[in-house]
Amino acid sequence: MRVVIAEDHALLRDGLTRLLEANDCTVVAAVDNGPELANALASLEVDVAVVDVRMPPTFTDEGLRVAIAAREAKPALPILVLSQYVEQLYARELLGSGAGAVGYLLKDRVSDVSSFVASVRQVADGGTVLDPEVVAALVSTAGRGSRLDRLTPREAEVLSLMAEGRSNAAIAGRLVVTDKAVSKHIGNIFDKLDLPMSDDDHRRVLAVVAWLQG
């Protein structure tokens, strides 16, 4: 798996590089500012980019804006945002295409190495992985449309856990129900959100986007 890392703090950038390379990843570029990130994403063959939000030269939302622009040029380019903050506007824009291959984790999650590496791989494979705090922040400000109002409280809870990138088995464990019950809830979610039959992974992404956009 070929990875680009964009992080302006040298110690964290080096730590991420070592961590990923120790887990069978190849870091093809490790940059510390927005223009170098844009160049790397445009010129290199990349399976996933791990991107900080606030980077030089603006130290505001440089990383996210470069990531969004890169996905416009290369649709569904896998991007995992790693940040200390939840930037709601840009997080919604990043998720808005419904194409998946997007993650948004807070930096303290890196301390759980196995979970972090699994998240990087999940995004590279086209999945969506969102930090629980990101989900909470986005859901708290999301308007509720008529389709989402169709969901029962349990279905809404299942969909929120899907937004965190949890598998059916993990959701079942969290809710203390059977895998079969989770599958039934997810089927109901797809039906109530009017998501047509297609690859289940793709429908999961579309369902999460519908939930976050309200």
Image: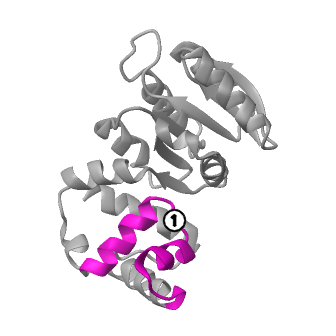
- Image location (x, y in percent) of residue 124: 65, 48
| Residue 42 against residue 141 in the figure, above or below | above
Looking at the image, which residue is at 17% across and 57% down? 143
- Image location (x, y in percent) of residue 90: 35, 36
- Image location (x, y in percent) of residue 45: 75, 33
Q: Main secondary structure of the magenta part?
A: helix
Kind of residue indicated by mark 1? Arg
Foreground residue among 65 and 50:
50
| Residue 151 against residue 70 in the figure, above or below | below
| Residue 13 against residue 3 in the figure, above or below | above
Q: Is residue 90 magenta?
A: no
The magenta region covers 153-180
Foreground residue among 29 and 14:
14
The answer to whether residue 141 is left or right of residue 192 is: left
Q: Quadrant of the C terminus?
A: bottom left
Looking at the image, which residue is at 29% across and 55% down? 213
Please, what secondary structure does the residue beneath circle 1 have? loop
Q: Residues within 10 Å of mark 1 (few under 14, many from 20)?
A: some
Looking at the image, which residue is at 36% across and 47% down? 134
Judge whether residue 198 can be spotted in this image. Answer: no
Looking at the image, which residue is at 52% across and 47% down? 102
Q: Quadrant of the N terminus?
A: top right
Give the color scheme: rainbow, by chain, secondary structure or one colour: one colour
Which residue, given by chain and number where applicable, does mark 1 sit on?
A: 166
Q: Is residue 173 magenta?
A: yes
Task: Determine the image quadrant of residue 22.
Answer: top right
| Residue 12 against residue 186 in the figure, above or below | above
